[in-house]
Image (cartoon, grey):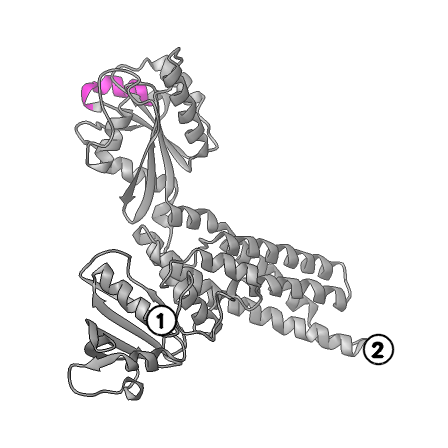
Amino acid sequence: MNPYSTQDTIIALSTPYGMGAIAMIRMSGSESIALTNRFFESKFGKKDLTQMDSHTVHLGYIHDGNQPIDEVLVSIFKNPNSYTGEDLVEISCHGSTYIQHSIIQHFVANGVRPAEAGEFTMRAFLNGKMDLSQTEAVADLIHAQSEAAKNVALKQLKGGFSNELSEVKKQLIHFASLIELELDFAEEDVEFADRKQLENLVQKTIVHVEQLAQSFKWGNAIKNGINTTIVGRPNAGKSTLLNTLLNEERAIVTEIAGTTRDTLEETIHIKGFLFRFIDTAGLRETEDIVEKIGVAKALEKLHQSDLFIYLFDSNVTNLDVLSDDIQNLPTHIPHLIVGNKSDLISLEKKSEITLIDKEIIFISAQLKEDIEILKDALLEKLALHNIDTSATIITNARHYDALIQVKVSLVEVLSGLKEGMSGDLLSIDLRQALYHLGSITGEITSDDILGNVFANFCIGK
């Protein structure tokens, strides 16, 4: 059976599985209202749900024969004005797992099919309620772990990204149609499409597409969190700093050098952005086999990070050693150099350290001094202060890949225009650019793409 057959009426639990105060069961399809009506008894006299207005709520009981299963609230949404574009029913029942299971199984026994992952949203896409990029935003919104991720997903769900692409497509289609019209009059040797206007449009579009594609770097970080590794020599206070940022005793802290043997990861929200902090083993030469593995893992995490903090003990670190360490840091990865235990050093010592690198930030992780300065510096280092999360930001790798292909095709068009290429060849490259734009919104798609998109959804959405 095709898991996305639109002929079936489907049902699923849309709230998280498990016991709670209330659960919500969703049913969509041509028979959803009629079937619900068959097993529904209103608390306020006989009521025919099929005759009720859309977007109305009804209190009563779901029955299995003469036996009520539960007292419920039934919400009716009639096509096409529903999430899926079909007749849709939402049954709010008590949160007992037994009750949830009983209601769902009762409808399944009467011809309703359990929904596949993402099938409700798939139907919304197939029925033109949203395009493919908007359906992906639904999944992003469900999984948003920060304010920034929520804002970006909500912007896409509201159609911000789709509208931008629509404007680009409209202009390209206009020129593509004029060029193809020329092909019908090839013997007359006429030009309907102004080549200079087309060249200017393609140049502007390439810049726009590049800007969107470049936003993926930050969009991916916003969506999945910014991997931030804390590295440094033993006893620099890395674990203390992690505990301070978390505001809880998460990492073991002792005076013994080399306490941290493995990596420890925790997520922290800083002014609307999600950071994934990774505490690592102290970097030093050691004969201890376990600690040696920990050091290797620390270096591995360092080179995989979006950003790292090099933490040193400003009270005891030798200035020559510090200078050598800073010189050996991987400069291609954004980083901050942070002097810990600043409460224990004199102004003279601080000045000497600052001569090595003027951008060193001083904190006291134990006393929680200047931690807010460090947080601001993390945002500043990645220019997160300047990111407008209400603007269009690409968070999806599929969209990024498609935009890169759009750019490749448009560069070919631009090259062809400059070389005086014939209209039929220009048309091929323009159509290719339009194809890749269409693949983002789902106007051009395949079963494989749809399968990959909706496989990431939860059942019930």
Residue at image location 43% in from the left, 73% down from the top? 129
Q: How many marks?
A: 2
Residue at image location 68% in from the left, 60% down from the top? 413
Indicate yes or no whether the magenta region holds residue 353: yes
Q: Quadrant of residue 25?
A: bottom left
Q: Is residue 357 visible?
A: yes
In the image, farthest residue toward the right? 187
Give the foreground label among 2 and 1. Answer: 1
Q: Mark 2 falls on what kind of element?
A: helix
User: Of the residues shown, which amino acid type is indicated by label 2?
Assistant: Glu
- Relative to 32, 254 lies left or right: left
Q: Main secondary structure of the magenta part?
A: helix
> Which residue position holds label 1?
109
Indicate yes or no whether the magenta region holds residue 349: yes
- Relative to 415, 331 lies left or right: left
Q: Position of residue 173 (x, y in %)?
A: 62, 71
Query: Is 111 drawn above or below residue 205 in the view shown?
Result: below
Q: Quadrant of residue 349?
A: top left
User: Nearer the N terminus, badge 2 or badge 1?
Assistant: 1
Q: Magenta span covers which residues? A: 343-354
Please name whichever residue, 47 or 63, is drawn nearer the observer in this view of the structure: 63
Task: Using a 10 Å C-alpha cutoff, classify the residue at mark 1 as few (fewer than 14 neighbours), some (14 to 19) or many (20 or more).
Answer: few
Please name whichever residue, 55 or 339, is drawn nearer the observer in this view of the structure: 55
Query: Is 79 drawn above or below residue 258 in the view shown?
Result: below
The disc placed on residue 98 is: none
Q: Position of residue 290 (x, y in %)?
A: 37, 18
User: Of the residues shown, which amino acid type is indicated by label 1?
Assistant: Ala
> Which residue position holds label 2?
187
